[in-house]
Image (cartoon, helix red, strand yellow):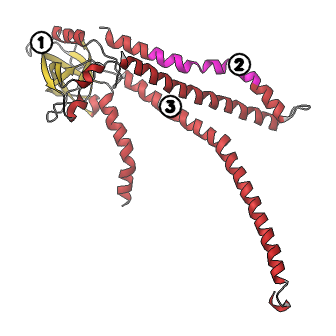
Amino acid sequence: MIAFLKLIFFGLVGLSIVYLSLSVFSASLRRERLEKEYDADPVPGQTRDDYVETGMAAYRTSMRPKLLLLVYVVPVAIWGGIVYVINTN
Amino acid sequence: MRILAFLFQLLPILMVGVVLHYVLPQHDIVRVVNTYQERQDLNDWTRIFWSDPSPQSATLVNRDVQFIQTVRKKTFLLGFIQRDTTEVMVYRNEDTGWGWPFYFKFDTASLQTEADDLRSTPENPKWALITHYGWRNGYFSAFPNAIAIRPVSSPDETVIPWFNIVFFVIVIFLIGMVRAMWFQFRERMIDPAMDAAGDRMDIAQARMDARRSRMRRWFDSWKPKDRR
């Protein structure tokens, strides 16, 4: 039981580190793209910062940040699969 | 000297390789001869070659371990090339529980029963595929741990190591991912910070120069004209 709790605890900590770094990485990629878009083709009547912030607000409500939650789902599913396959004959 | 440095750089890769060779699953074509159970002393450094089926077993000085005695087909190159000769191989059969290495094996008793069911004689052999991890070493009494066993129709069965293929694909993907994340972090966070610090340094330097030249002019004003 203690070994199981240890696995759950350290697994969750590890996956949370992966999730947080991936969220930062993904947001950073989007911000860079928005900045480059504005620099290549400035929108009249909108500052660069405004353009980027509107884009980031749209990003935060989009599907992609939610898809990153798969970081928790996929490894747990694989783990369940391994436990099942190993222990059935 | 350069060779030595190269070998030294190779060391971490070698160590990771050794750990992976111990931990990743491998397949053997075997004929089960017998199974037995034996009391094992677990109180010296060779303890690392035995499992921790449950937390309470970590403190035990000795306990019973189940074994599977087999005759197996010899192979070359990590099992990729089969040979016609055979050798004896003894596997231990232990739970790994929820701990390292992460096989989550709890069906030791069932596996032992399956192995018993597959026992055969050299005259009338029943071949089986055994999945295991670990090393056999007679001097340290180390045994590979059997994970699964299933009957195969012929001793020349080709086995595709699907788990290892997927494992290495995922590892390569993760290395690429970490690299991309690091480059992005450096480009967006570290480089601008360094640039800002560099700019501040330049401004400070310019100010110092200006002050120095003012001082110099003032000093010079005290000197005779021909020595300025």
Can you tell which of label 3 and label 1 is closer to the viewer?
Answer: 3
Q: Nearer the viewer, residue B119 or B47?
A: B47
- Callout 3: SS: helix
Q: Find residue A62 and name its label.
A: 2
User: Is residue B152 visible in the rendered structure shown here?
Assistant: no
Q: Secondary structure at mark 1?
A: loop
User: Which of the two residues, B38 or B85, is positioned nearer the viewer here?
Assistant: B38
Q: Position of residue B116 (x, y in %)?
A: 16, 10
Residue A87: image x %, image y %? 32, 11
Q: Earlier in the sequence, mark 3 or mark 1?
A: 1
Magenta stretch, main secondary structure, is helix
Q: What residue is disc 1 on?
A: B120
Badge 3 density bin: few <14, some 14–19, many ≥20, Cα 10 Å: few
Range shown magenta: A57-78
**Image mark for residue B174:** 3
At label 3, the amino acid type is Leu
Q: In the displayed orientation, state which residue is furthest to the right.
A: A45
Q: CA distance from mark 1 to mark 2?
A: 62 Å
Q: Are marks 1 and 2 in contact (CB under 8 Å)?
A: no
On residue B218, the disc is: none
